[in-house]
Image: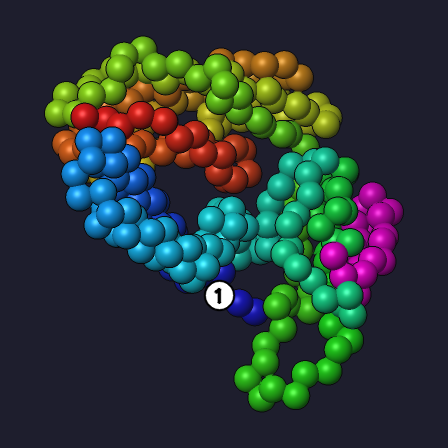
Amino acid sequence: MVNFTYFKNLTCNKNRALKEFLVRFLLFSSAENDFMQIGKNASTTSLNFKKQVVSLFIFILLIGYTSEAQNQIGSESNQFYKVISFGEKIDFGTIDESVTWTIANSAKNIHAAIRGNEINNYSFEEPGEYEINFHENKKHDEECYHPAFEERFKVKVESVRLTFDFSKITFSEKITRGRNYKDLIITVPAKITAKDNSNTKLPAPVMSVAGLGVSFTVEPVEKEIVIGNKTQLLKYKVSGIVDQETYLMFDFYDFNNQVQTYNLHQVIK
């Protein structure tokens, strides 16, 4: 079996590096636009900007899997390939048509046999544990070839789904560089949908903030959430400081430890 715990630590570190790189790239591109507008060293700056774009593309190709890997590996990663909510699909990437899959949830009497990319369109409608069997029929001559997936792995489907509405996110104060915050409140509407009544309350999901020179601690205002098929306002208290010019990325985690990211489209300065 794959050591998912080690892989989690590795990919989380790379994911932080990717976010820092993206923030630096955004700051660079913003500065490039300013230089272009005032006409100073326009050709040189444009060339450097193109080099940055190429570097970003290569960088994403090298570690582009990290965000997906981070989502795939949660607190239950030693047991499950991924933990999702009912009604969701899993993107396994591009799969050769020679591959066959079997999906089974014996408790719900669910059995399915599909091929290739059809796995990406399979919706896990019922909560419970699913056993996924991966079988590659194509022969490979390469000595160092390794299958893309384990022959058998499990997916857990939870009965509660959480979706954030970032179009209505609000901040109690404007975030500025150099200011030490103690009670900044971030409020975001969230739709909570339950498949059954097995859960009445759940611990409030966590949130974190990424950026250059960011030293923020975040805690939910309410420690528990009452489950119901309605939209709720989730509030987070933010404390700390931003000590250099940066963009900010807010990572909101759902009940399955899956990340939904909100990018603040302004430079903190």
Residue drawn where x is 84% and y is 48% of the image: 110
Residue matched to label 1: 3
Is 83 colored magenta in this rendering? no
User: Which residue is depicted at the point 31% across and 11% down?
Assistant: 172
Q: Residue at x 20, y 21 (%)?
A: 176
Q: Based on the displayed image, in which of its 4 quarters is residue 89 positioned?
A: top right
Q: Quadrant of the N terminus?
A: bottom right
Q: Is residue 99 visible?
A: yes
Tell me where residue 174 sits by quadrant. Answer: top left
Residue 17 pos. (x, y %): 31, 51
Is 221 placed above or below 134 here? above
Place of residue 231 in the rendered image (x, y in percent of width and height, measured from the top left): 59, 14
Name the residue type under label 1.
Answer: Asn
Magenta stretch? Answer: 100-117
Residue 67: where, in percent of width, then height? 47, 49
Can residue 16 be seen in the rendering of this structure? no
Magenta stretch: dominant secondary structure: strand
Where disc 1 sits, the SS reads loop
Question: Could you tell me which quadrant the C terminus lies in?
Answer: top left
Residue in front for this viewpoint, 227 or 182: 182
